[in-house]
Image: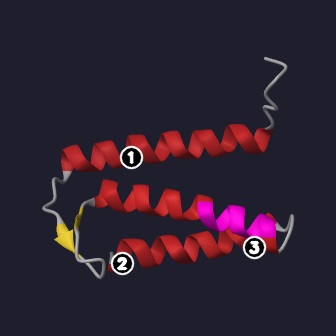
Amino acid sequence: MAWMAWTWPTAAFFGVIALLLITFTILAIKFPETPRTGILRIETTRGDRLFITLLGSAFINLAWLGIVGANQPYALIVCLIYAVAVFRYV
């Protein structure tokens, strides 16, 4: 696997995604929910909001890299604020 640069940050990223998926699966089994309608006027569940958050965070990080440069820890702060907004209002 010399073609892929597995570093600790890369492994941590995939580990966090795996833990999020496991956590949200357990939450869905233990605490079923009904979809709710937010500011997008579409019905979403916790899993939908997680997907929207992950997709939006990817775009935030790509835009940050293109506009600002390599100061990615600040992009993480923007992503966390975005995640709170998505889970609260979408």
Q: Quadrant of the N terminus?
A: top right
Identify which amino acid the numbered label 2 is placed on.
Arg
Identify which amino acid the numbered label 3 is placed on.
Tyr
Q: Position of residue 30 (x, y in %)?
A: 20, 47
Residue at position x 60%, y 70% in the image: 79
Image quadrant where residue 36 sits:
bottom left
SS at circle 1: helix
* The residue stretch that appears in magenta: 59-66
21, above or below 33, in the image = above
Q: Quadrant of the C terminus?
A: bottom left
- Residue labelled with disc 3: 74
Q: Position of residue 40 (x, y in %)?
A: 30, 77
Ranked by sequence position, the earlier of labels 1 and 3 is: 1
**Residue 14 located within the stretch drawn in magenta:** no
Give the camera-side residue of 71 and 15: 71
Q: Position of residue 17 (x, y in %)?
A: 53, 45
- Give the distance between the C-alpha atoms of the residues marked 2 and 3, in whole angstroms: 22 Å
For this view, does 85 lie left or right of residue 47?
right
SS at circle 2: helix
Ranked by sequence position, the earlier of labels 2 and 1 is: 1
Residue at position x 13%, y 62% in the image: 34
Q: Position of residue 37 (x, y in %)?
A: 20, 74
18, above or below 37, in the image = above
Q: Nearer the viewer, mark 2 or mark 1?
A: 2
Residue 73 visible? no
Residue at position x 41%, y 73% in the image: 86
- Residue labelled with disc 2: 88
- Residue labelled with disc 1: 23
SS at circle 3: helix
Report crowding for label 3: few under 14, some 14 to 19, many 20 or more residues within 10 A (C-alpha): few
54, above or below 7, in the image = below
